[in-house]
Amino acid sequence: MPALENLNLVPFVSVEKMMDLVLATGTETFLTELAAYIEEDFRRWESFDKVARVAAHSIDGVIELMPASDGRLYGFKYVNGHPKNTKTGRQTVTAFGVLADVDTGYPLLLSEMTILTALRTAATSAVAAKYLAPNGSRRMAIIGNGAQSEFQALAFKALLGIDNLRLYDLDPSATQRCKTNLERFGFHIEACSSAEQAVEGADIVTTVTADKQNATILTDNMIGAGLHINAVGGDCPGKTELHRDILLRSDIFVEFPPQTRIEGEIQQLPADHAVTELWDVIVGNAQGRRSDRQITLFDSVGFATEDFSALRYVRDKIAGTAFFDNLDLLADPDEPRDLFGMLLRRQAAQG
Amino acid sequence: MPALENLNLVPFVSVEKMMDLVLATGTETFLTELAAYIEEDFRRWESFDKVARVAAHSIDGVIELMPASDGRLYGFKYVNGHPKNTKTGRQTVTAFGVLADVDTGYPLLLSEMTILTALRTAATSAVAAKYLAPNGSRRMAIIGNGAQSEFQALAFKALLGIDNLRLYDLDPSATQRCKTNLERFGFHIEACSSAEQAVEGADIVTTVTADKQNATILTDNMIGAGLHINAVGGDCPGKTELHRDILLRSDIFVEFPPQTRIEGEIQQLPADHAVTELWDVIVGNAQGRRSDRQITLFDSVGFATEDFSALRYVRDKIAGTAFFDNLDLLADPDEPRDLFGMLLRRQAAQG
């Protein structure tokens, strides 16, 4: 019944509304619920139309479009990555996204995704760790204490019960800020003065540094048997965090191989190096962790289905709430073929 | 000076603001100014990063992302094409787009593009016709009198002086509506009862029908020597409007061959059939019309640079006006690396 709908309006979740939604839900609950959507979509991996992201590279960064569709819903995210942005007070990564109805092509949701991407990245890491981290993991090292670090900590607390953190960043003030931000959440937190110190006694090592260059955050000698490595920061061509020797000792798990081969830690390896797809582990086609001595590596780059899951979650979550505004985004003439007449009628109405 | 800017805000041109902008400018002036931006960007065609659109096809339609960048600005359009939408009171085509700064990745503009796409499609057709239509063209047939028809008429009036229209649509009420909408603009308009009748005496034939199927709107015998054909409606795989024999008698001009080979009228021809790129004509690398007897065909499918031009024009046009709202789209923490702290501070502010 078109007459009953406002077909021109698209629900819009602003940054402010997103913050309010997360806070009203509780960050850990939000991460847990979001992780369930992400895991659900990994379970039906084969029903998705998947493409590697569409990237426009420039000297200082990249702008990407990340579409995904399950045949009923279509989602895409716009996201940039500009490491130098912090010098001008901007975010390295900002994002927004749209969910649409495949049957009509009409957008159903426009949402900020800077905050939501941070949450979905952390939730995805935690989903992977559920299958890959040593049983009974309690202690996680976080190397790189920038914008993503607290989200990783809370996701691992919410989904795996991690309550002991060892933090390290080249910039001690970043570590201090991360520690201060997280203290109220019931963690035991140690600020470390080196990456070596941070990984001591850790069950899980999360690397989430921001520099756009090949770096060696972890060297081979730092990684003992049985660890799970959650490698988040290496996520574009020329940007890696782990020494190649670590990769050769690890069982490597990835989201979407065609994209990870280009963007992930495994860009350091031959294109035919064996990796396991995370969805195969989740549905039971492949084994995750199988021994106490095994080194597991989740080579996270972030895939479009995770953004799709996040948009799907937010859309369900805001229904019937005040956590969105309506945006006059779509032309909605009374007579669909009469787009020009809409202009004329507006002119007439203005006198 | 980040402290002086509201980095979170992105100018947003809603459908209502777009209508007001077009009306305040005057539709013909808007089309003329927009055509100048489009032509300017065709002139620097080689400076663009060009890719064929990224399409997600479904049974009832298609959702596409169309990115383009000149190295300083990046634009993309989201657009759907769902012919059955009119049955539920929706537009066949809706669109919105974003212009962003390549140096920072930050969006500079979010705009409705349903109306803007109609305008840019018409403006592009008129730009092409400036180079391809017979000198002194006054009379244009428009076959298909749907949402795009009036925009085509006004663009050809503004840029070429077309003041005599011959309209035909399978649905006579569409023709009548188009005629009524256009009468106030000083055209001589004849409603025709067949396509054959419409093309009689025409200098230019514009085909802009909407069915998603191979159709034959124009047959070979209808096209006499010297005509310019502006073929707008054939714009996706399986959707063409012209009989193949017309193509074989025409000199064919296209926007971006890799896309037009898939989506345009020339999908009916072998992949190596000679075509001329419009930008080559505009910069003088290739000849446009060269004789009174030549049949020229602009096989329009709509390319991402035209949307880029349109977004660039709108951005320049709204500066210092009230034709936009500010949208809280980008997370803007006081300390760029402290995204999570922004959440905490909002929580604290809420008590």
Image (cartoon, coloured by chain):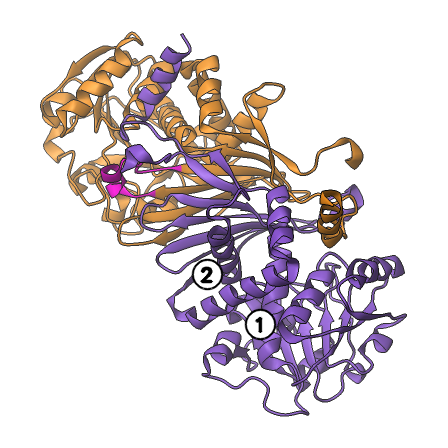
Chain colours: A purple, B orange
Left or right of A286 on screen, residue B331: right
Quadrant location, the C terminus of chain A: top left
- Image x and y of residue A346, in percent: 38, 17
**Dot 1 falls on which chain?**
A
Q: Which dot, 2 or 1, sits closer to the camera? A: 1
Query: Up-down: is A188 above or below B14?
Result: below
The Cα–Cα distance between marks 2 and 1, rounded to whole angstroms, is: 22 Å
Quarter of the view holding residue A6: top left
The kind of residue tagged 1 is Val
Left or right of B81 on screen, residue B194: left
**Dot 2 falls on which chain?**
A
Inspect the magenta stretch and tell me whether residue B89 lies in it. yes
Residue annotated with mark 2: A51
Question: In what element is the residue under mark 1?
Answer: helix
The kind of residue tagged 2 is Val
Say if mark 2 contacts mark 1, CB within 8 Å: no
Inspect the magenta stretch and tell me whether residue B83 lies in it. yes
Q: Which residues are magenta?
A: B81-94
Residue annotated with mark 1: A127
The residue that appears at 52% across and 41% down in the rendered structure is A12
